Amino acid sequence: MPYILEHLSSLRQEITDLRNMNARFANKSSDSQIDQSAVEMRANRLAEIKKELSQMLNRPEDPAVWWEKGGGRNRVA
């Protein structure tokens, strides 16, 4: 369970960061190719997060899958 909570917290922070970057971009008047590429990358990442969150709702049939991920409490970040 700690793994899931940490992961959700990390995803929440990433969503906030992506929203802040999108807000800053919306205030810029330039529309360069690099800026457009960055917008697309952020949109893709938000879609990946959405997919990941929906997959987290589907509990795997094997309970060991949940416990294996949470067992590494001594791992280095």
Image (cartoon, grey):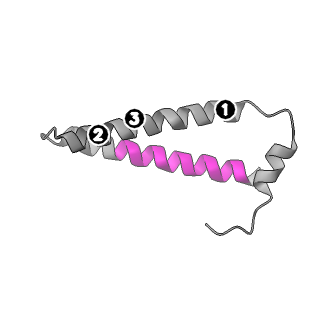
Q: Secondary structure at mark 1?
A: helix
Dot 1, how many residues are within 10 Å of its Cα: few (below 14), some (14-19), or many (20+)? few
Task: Classify residue 14 as left or right of residue 29.
Answer: right
Mark seen at residue 21 = none
Q: Which residue was labeled with disc 1? A: 55
Q: Residue at x 53, y 45 (%)?
A: 12
The quadrant of the image that shows the C terminus is: bottom right
Mark seen at residue 43 = 3
Q: Which residue was labeled with disc 2? A: 37
Task: Classify residue 57 as left or right of residue 12.
Answer: right
Q: Residue at x 80, y 45 (%)?
A: 66
Is the magenta region chiefly helix, strand or loop? helix
Q: Secondary structure at mark 3?
A: helix
Residue 20, x across and y down, in percent: 34, 46
Residue 17, x across and y down, in percent: 41, 49
Contact between labelled residues 2 and 3, with CB atoms less than 8 Å apart: no
Instruction: Give the alpha-carbon distance from disc 1 to disc 3, as whole Å.
Output: 19 Å
N-terminal-most mark, 3 or 2:
2
Instruction: Give the alpha-carbon distance from disc 3 to disc 2, as whole Å.
Output: 10 Å
* Residue type pointed to by label 1: Gln
Residue 55, x across and y down, in percent: 66, 32
Contact between labelled residues 1 and 2, with CB atoms less than 8 Å apart: no
Dot 2, how many residues are within 10 Å of its Cα: few (below 14), some (14-19), or many (20+)? few
Is-magenta flag for residue 18?
A: yes
Start and end of the magenta stretch?
3-20
Q: Residue furthest toward the left?
A: 29
Residue 54, x across and y down, in percent: 63, 30
Q: Which is in the foreground here, disc 2 or disc 1?
A: 2
